[in-house]
Image: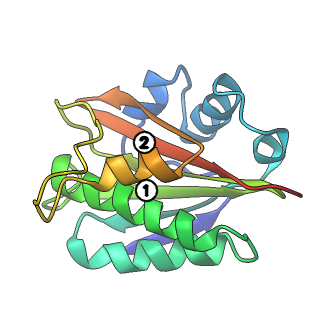
C-alpha cells in the first residue's frame, strides 16, 4: 500500500501535528521548518509526501520515493541512506508496524534537503546508539547524527515526527 501525493495531505492521525502546535500535517511541517531555522528555500519548497504500509517490504519503496523526490540533489545518496534509517526505526520501534502506516515527507532546496518520517508513535524516545558495538543493529540514529547537518523529533506515544536536514555548499 502506497498513497503518494504532492503538496497538502493528511494522515490517519494528526497527533504529531498537534504536538508541533498545528492542526494538520502541512501546518506542522511549516512550523517545524520555521522553529528549527531551516533554510528559507525549504520553507517555500512544496513538500513531496507518501504514505506507506507499516511493513518491512516498504523500506525499498520509501528509498525510491525519496530518491525521486530529491532528483538532482547532490547529496541524494546520503539523504536516501538516512531516510532509510528513519523508516527502519519507525518500523522496528513504533506503532507503525503490524498493520500501521508511516509517512515520508521530503523537501529539496538549492543547498539543502529535509526528510521527515511521521509514524505511529512510541513510549520510547529516539536516541543514537553507540557505534563501537559489534551488534548488527542499533546504529541508525548514530549514522543520522554523524551525517546530517541536524536532526530531531517531536511527539510521543500517539505519533511522532523524526526529521533530518542535510546541507551542501552552493545553490
Residue 73 quadrant: bottom right
Image position of 72 (left or right of 59): right
Residue for point 37% across, 41% down: 13
Q: Mark 1 points at which residue?
A: 103
Numbered label attached to residue 21: none
Looking at the rendered structure, the number of numbered marks drawn on it comes to: 2
Q: Position of residue 143 (x, y in %)?
A: 38, 54
Residue 34 quadrant: top right
Direction right: furthest residue: 171
Q: Is 27 above or below relative to 142?
A: above
Q: Which of 25 and 76 is in front in this view?
A: 76
Crowd around label 1: few <14 · some 14–19 · many ≥20 (10 Å): many
Residue for point 54% across, 27% down: 23
Image quadrant containing the C terminus: bottom right
Direction front: furthest residue: 132
Q: Which of 36 and 117 is in front in this view?
A: 36
Question: Marks 2/1: CA distance?
Answer: 11 Å
Residue for point 12% across, 60% down: 98
* Lower sequence index among marks 2 and 1: 1
- Which type of secondary structure does the marked residue at label 2 adopt? strand
Image position of 32 (left or right of 3): right
Q: Mark 2 points at which residue?
A: 162
Q: Is 151 above or below relative to 92?
A: above
Looking at the image, can residue 167 be seen?
yes
Q: Is 79 above or below relative to 17?
A: below
Amino acid at each position: 500500500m502506497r498513497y503518494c501525493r504532492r503538496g497538502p495531505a493528511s494522515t490517519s492521525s494528526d497527533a504529531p501535528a498537534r504536538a508541533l502546535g498545528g492542526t494538520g500535517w502541512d501546518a506542522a511541517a511549516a512550523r517545524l521548518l520555521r522553529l528549527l531555522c531551516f533554510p528559507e528555500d525549504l520553507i517555500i519548497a512544496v513538500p513531496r509526501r507518501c504514505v506507506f504500509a507499516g511493513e518491512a517490504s516498504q523500506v525499498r519503496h520509501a528509498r525510491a520515493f525519496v530518491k525521486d523526490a530529491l532528483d538532482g540533489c547532490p547529496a541524494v545518496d546520503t539523504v536516501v541512506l538516512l531516510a532509510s534509517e528513519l523508516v527502519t526505526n519507525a518500523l522496528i520501534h513504533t506503532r507503525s508496524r503490524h498493520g500501521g502506516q508511516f509517512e515520508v515527507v521530503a523537501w529539496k532546496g538549492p543547498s539543502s534537503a529535509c526528510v521527515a518520517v511521521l509514524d505511529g508513535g512510541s513510549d520510547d524516545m529516539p536516541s543514537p546508539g553507540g557505534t563501537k558495538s559489534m551488534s548488527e543493529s542499533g546504529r541508525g540514529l548514530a549514522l543520522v547524527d554523524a551525517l546530517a547537518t541536524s536532526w530531531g523529533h517531536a511527539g510521543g506515544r500517539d505519533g511522532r515526527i523524526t526529521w533530518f536536514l542535510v546541507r551542501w555548499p552552493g545553490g
